[in-house]
Image: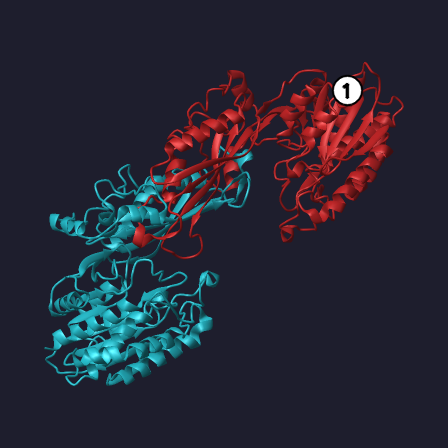
Chain colours: A red, B cyan
């Protein structure tokens, strides 16, 4: 055992106790009643980073919650890695579905249960502990490290862009590492190499100036709910392809290599179906489930509302109908271009007798990793050595808008090394982090720093 | 002036004061807190019918609110007319939109404003006053009259069918007259000669067993809201025709005579559009607005709900989507046949990967009057004499389920002579009854009794 292995082994319990301390702070950024706790959490983290041996530690105010910033300067010629994470968490609701309270961490079956255990306090804590172990070792940490831990990720990282812009020089780095994603299995490390983007729209169809009696008026005036349904039906074709003209123009067709790499991924479609309670999967013709989720764009209705929605029957011809519709995008689709094409197409589908309005809620740029470079290779090798298996290059169907943001502002590649696991329920009740993965992950990060510093 | 004209003229004010008394009773059948008032209203009406000179008056209990029954026996060979009406009313909500309180009758611009003034207490009161005038005249009323005034019309006349069945013999008559419909203009009497029927359905589309993250799952599982939209879109064709196979099989095409009779009706389409705030009317190709409303069946979405419907954006792939859809039917469509055809068609449109369920809420048989017979002719002639214009034979796009019920149980034709007016807002705030029409209508009914008894 190396000096650091001994350190990690001897401090195992303390690490867990400290993590519990962090998880006890209800740093819920979405609810203003927790504002004091969110700020307390930033201070706790700052103090903890100092204790870990980071030389510069600051709590930097923004127009929202502060960013905890820390820095370790090794040598001007050493590589520089910026670590991003967040200390804010989702609300605990519905609280009554938790086995133990959300902010009273409880270890069961080797899992730490608490809000934020996986998303993202637990994974931030792994980085802090790996840095502590390296900084306290005889050899020290011959790599430049910067940490940006924000408190507004769960509310859309509203002030992060400005923060990155304002501190662009100070934050300059060779790579950005983020641990806020998942692995597929506990023994199988993963690097997330692609994210879908997003264009989130809302369609409002207005007909008569009020709700009408469907007997007295039905058949003589366009029904906005029927009109909305036909518009939505016109957004997809019979092959499950999005029918917005130009939608696929910039979509990269999958390469043979990409398809082959997906075949190597342990994905159990029947377990997927069972978990969701569906008899068959569905989607764009010519693609399988992982391809559809990771490499293909899609369109989903997220919400529908019109007229009478209570129990029973009311003979109303609604004055208005609304739908929220979002599209997941893949490289090189451009959210703004897609918004415009969507709007144009929806308006072209609008029948006479109703007024149709299309609103844009928000977007996210799709992202694909460049799986090369010293930091990527060090991370990959360290994960393989620690977990005993080569990390999978996976993708994520969702969007992480800050990933392309970091790349565009700091001009450095982002590497997503995540330690969550399927079913960890990051935004739901009984969120958990596997403690074996937690400790193995810390070892892997230590290993990575070693490789980068040698 | 005849004896009765003098009577009506001398009692004008008393009639209005009595109507106010009736309207002050908040006989709201839909809200249990008014149960005492509903029963009090029945008693008030019974007492009032006795005072009017009806010999037999009973408050007959049902499993719900009582029926007020009254009878005048003239001669066994005289014609027998049964008058149906209801003494219950809709709730006053939204109360803050009323100019004066709903249950404090107020006369403005020659209109009596109060809940129930038009629907249906005012029109019931007209019948009572006409009978009173005839019964107190020297000649008396040489026609057999039966009144059935129920207290559950606004809650679906739940116990009426059983009441009619139980008292079928006692209620036997030559015609049933109902005053619960409208005229098109104050000077233009109308007899409603057709009603559309109804088949009210609910479609539930179930996909995954829970709401999913639309990023993590979108594109790989059938979205029930998208599926619902495409099902609804498949219910109509591009010509505004209902696409349910067999839907039009029993629909009577309009005759040339029917179309010609509609041309005679003073219908201002631009006023219709202005009132509804729509730029164009819409509907089945080949028909105009009145034809669409009165002679053609139709299909309307009454309600839609799925997923996230709050403000802003939530990236949810809903587990379920629901729509309420109703069809208005015309003679000789059969509600049960249509329900079955609708269900079959919806299921045939269901895509793979979702479970679709179709539920039937309620139905109503379409109805067409037989505009002949002594009572119809007496009513028609009396209206013409009193209002100075021949009554229009109009139709109503809505359904009155009790109309076909009376015909089928009592085997007597129903005659709908209504005294409401467009805009009288029977289920909304500031409901009103035109007092000039009220008094003229009483005169017309007196005239009708005269013709039937001569």
Residue B440 in which image quadrant: bottom left
User: Which residue is outermost to the right?
Assistant: A138
The quadrant of the image that shows the C terminus of chain A is: top right
From the top left corner, tell me how far across and down residue B451 is, in percent: 12, 74
Would residue A54 be visible to someone looking at this image?
A: no
| Above or below, A388 relative to A90 | above
Image side of residue B444 versus residue B236, left or right: left
From the top left corner, tell me how far across and down residue B429 is, in percent: 41, 61
Q: Alpha-carbon neighbours of circle 1 within 10 Å: few (<14), some, or many (≥20)?
A: many
Q: Nearer the viewer, residue A164 or B325?
A: A164
Q: Nearer the viewer, residue B417 or A438?
A: B417
The quadrant of the image that shows the N terminus of chain A is: top right
Q: Nearer the viewer, residue A17 or A164?
A: A164
> Which structural element holds mark 1?
strand
Residue under numbered circle 1:
A80
Disc 1 chain ID: A
| Above or below, B367 relative to A322 | below
Residue at left offset 18%, top offset 51% = B262
Image side of residue A5 versus residue B364, left or right: right
Would residue A405 be visible to someone looking at this image?
A: yes
Question: Number of marks in the image?
Answer: 1
From the top left corner, tell me how far across and down residue A351 is, in percent: 34, 37
From the top left corner, tell me how far across and down residue B130 is, in percent: 23, 76
């Amino acid at each position: 055992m190396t000096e650091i292995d001994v350190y990690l082994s001897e401090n195992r319990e303390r690490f867990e106790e400290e993590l519990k301390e962090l998880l006890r702070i209800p740093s819920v950024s979405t609810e203003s009643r927790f504002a004091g706790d969110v700020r307390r959490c930033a201070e706790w983290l700052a103090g903890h980073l100092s204790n870990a041996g980071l030389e510069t530690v600051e709590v930097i105010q923004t127009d929202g919650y502060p960013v905890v910033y820390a820095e370790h300067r090794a040598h001007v010629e050493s590589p520089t890695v910026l670590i991003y994470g967040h200390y804010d968490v989702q609300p605990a609701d519905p609280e009554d579905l938790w086995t133990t309270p959300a902010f009273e961490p409880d270890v069961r079956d080797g899992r730490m249960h608490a809000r934020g255990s996986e998303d993202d306090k637990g994974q931030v804590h792994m980085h802090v502990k790996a840095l502590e172990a390296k900084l306290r070792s005889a050899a020290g940490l011959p790599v430049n490290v910067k940490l940006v831990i924000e408190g507004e990720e769960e509310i859309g990282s509203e002030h992060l862009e400005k923060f990155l812009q304002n501190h662009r020089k100070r934050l300059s780095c060779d790579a950005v590492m983020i641990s806020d994603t998942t692995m597929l299995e506990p023994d199988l490390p993963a690097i997330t190499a692609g994210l879908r983007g997003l264009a989130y729209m809302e369609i409002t169809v207005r007909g008569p100036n009020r709700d009408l009696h469907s007997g007295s008026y039905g058949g003589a005036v366009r029904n906005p709910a029927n009109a909305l349904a036909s518009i939505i039906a016109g957004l997809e074709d019979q092959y499950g392809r999005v029918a917005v003209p130009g939608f696929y123009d910039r979509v990269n067709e999958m390469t043979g290599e990409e398809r082959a790499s997906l075949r190597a991924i342990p994905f159990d479609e029947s377990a997927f179906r069972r978990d969701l309670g569906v008899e068959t999967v569905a989607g764009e013709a010519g693609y399988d489930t992982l391809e559809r989720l990771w490499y293909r764009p899609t369109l989903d209705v997220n919400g529908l509302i019109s007229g009478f929605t209570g129990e029973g029957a009311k003979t109303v011809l609604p004055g208005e109908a609304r739908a929220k519709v979002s599209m997941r995008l893949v490289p090189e689709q451009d959210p703004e271009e897609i918004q415009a094409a969507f709007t144009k197409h929806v308006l072209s589908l609008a029948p006479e007798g109703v007024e149709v309005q299309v609103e844009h809620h928000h977007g996210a740029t799709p992202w694909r990793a460049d799986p090369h470079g010293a930091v990527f290779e060090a991370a990959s090798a360290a994960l393989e050595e620690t977990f005993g298996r080569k990390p999978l290059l996976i993708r994520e169907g969702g969007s992480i808008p800050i990933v392309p943001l970091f790349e565009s502002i700091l001009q450095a590649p982002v590497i997503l090394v995540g330690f969550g696991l399927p079913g960890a329920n990051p935004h739901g009740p009984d969120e958990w982090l596997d403690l074996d993965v937690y400790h193995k992950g810390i070892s892997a990060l230590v290993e990575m720093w070693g490789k980068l510093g040698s």
